[in-house]
Image (spheres, grey):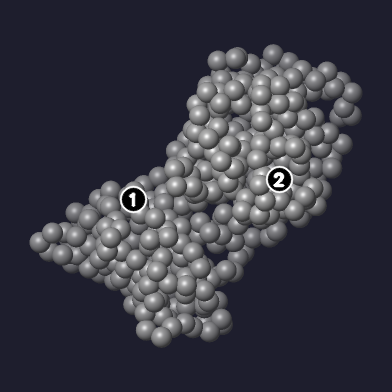
Amino acid sequence: MSRLIAALTILLTIACTKGAGAEDFSALTRVDSARSGISAAGSDGVALDLYLDFGVPWRLFMLDSPPRLVVDFREVDWSGVQAADLLKTDRIKGVQFGTYVPGWSRLVAELGGPMGIETAALKVEEATRNAHLAIRLKPVSKKVFAERSGAPHDPRWDLPAPAVVEAAPRRGPDDPLVVVLDPGHGGVDPGAETDVVDEKDLMLTFARELREVLLRTGGFKVVLTREDDSFVSLERRVSIAHQAGADVFISLHADSLAEGAAHGATVHMLSRDASDEASAKMAERHDRADLLAGMDLSETDDEVTGVLMDLARQETAPRTRALAEALVDGMAQTGGPMNRRPLRSAAFSVLKAADIPSVLIEIGFLSSPRDLSNLQNPEWRATMARGIRNGLAAWTQGDAAQRPLVRQ
């Protein structure tokens, strides 16, 4: 049923645009933020209005748990559009938008309750080519919403499927260390936000800078899970590490914590039980990113619970701890600053590769004025990059020394 409705929705969008010169549509269209908005409609409905420079192909569908409206475009420039300005009703809990995959954009609205699509149409002015996307929602029952929700499957629009890859053979003593750097968030998922910078942009910049430091040092091969402002699912980030034959996986973040005055760098390992409340909340927010980016997780199992204890393997768990400790020491020796409890653990899904030593580094916290200032400073970032490099180098030497002692 849901797939049929999704298909009909796609046909509706094509029909609505073809008569207005859809064959001329091409990226990149901009949003008129002054006229666009999501507002209350009637006593219990919602109106979403987006005014565009010109029309582009689009589709929409609903997802459940939590209830969300997803609208995909090819392609929208969201520059200058702020979520707080776009959202004008409390009937929508939140809205995110941005790049989804290269060439495609996405808007995700988290609904206050189950709602159905009453009308949806894209109208294009003949004279100006300006377009107006108008979507009207109305409440429906939970049962009806569940029946109508689900993501359509179309390879032209969908994310690349995570690959199932067998573990790569051990690297030789003279082979470079394969390091997969994972810039957190991206695309439709901005991560932590401030008035001056988003976490996704800052971490991509830092990952590129860290890659250069490692490559100039020699002895490292570096792969990034994303090279631009695109969304990458948590599962695919791990898949990329396996495809690259990673020796080490490092996820890079700079979170924001409203509850408390957290500051300084921290290194996190995977654990079923969080070492502290702050780490637990961060893991929950990071794992929620896939939902808020419009991923359909209704048919996936909770892989984390099945994989977490795999890290207790006699080899990977102690190697991961040694890696985390070496990174903490490396960053502390170059000046940090480090958090007063720099070594922590929580159930981060992105660290679930049981066969790859994997850590998540919070370089700092955007909610800390001191950290925010540091994170925007290229010289400070270079210092932290050198600290991470030193930590990796020290761990590599120690790991090589321990290798003959590990039971095969």
- Left or right for 382, reference 86: right
Q: Badge 2 local density, few (<14 within 10 Å), some, or many (20+)?
A: many
Query: As shown in the figure, which amino acid type bears the numbered disc 2?
Result: Lys
Whether residue 241 is visible to the viewer of this picture, yes or no, is no
Query: Image point 66% across, 54% down: which residue?
Result: 259
- Left or right for 404, reference 46: right
Query: Is label 1 in a helix, a strand or a loop?
Result: loop
Distance (Cα) linking label 1 and label 2: 36 Å
Please give the label number shown on residue 352. Answer: 2
Front-most of residues 61 and 250: 250
How far across and down, in percent of the image, does residue 99 sit?
A: 41, 49
Query: Is label 2 in a helix, a strand or a loop?
Result: loop
Q: Badge 1 local density, few (<14 within 10 Å), some, or many (20+)?
A: few
Mark sitting earlier along the chain (1/2): 1
- Whether pointer 1 and pointer 2 mark residues with C-beta atoms closer than 8 Å, the reply is no
Query: As shown in the figure, which amino acid type bears the numbered disc 1?
Result: Gly
Residue identifier under label 1: 80
Query: Image point 71% across, 49% down: which residue?
Result: 279
**Which dot, 1 or 2, sits closer to the camera?**
1
Front-most of residues 346 and 68: 346
Q: Is residue 106 above or below residue 330?
A: below
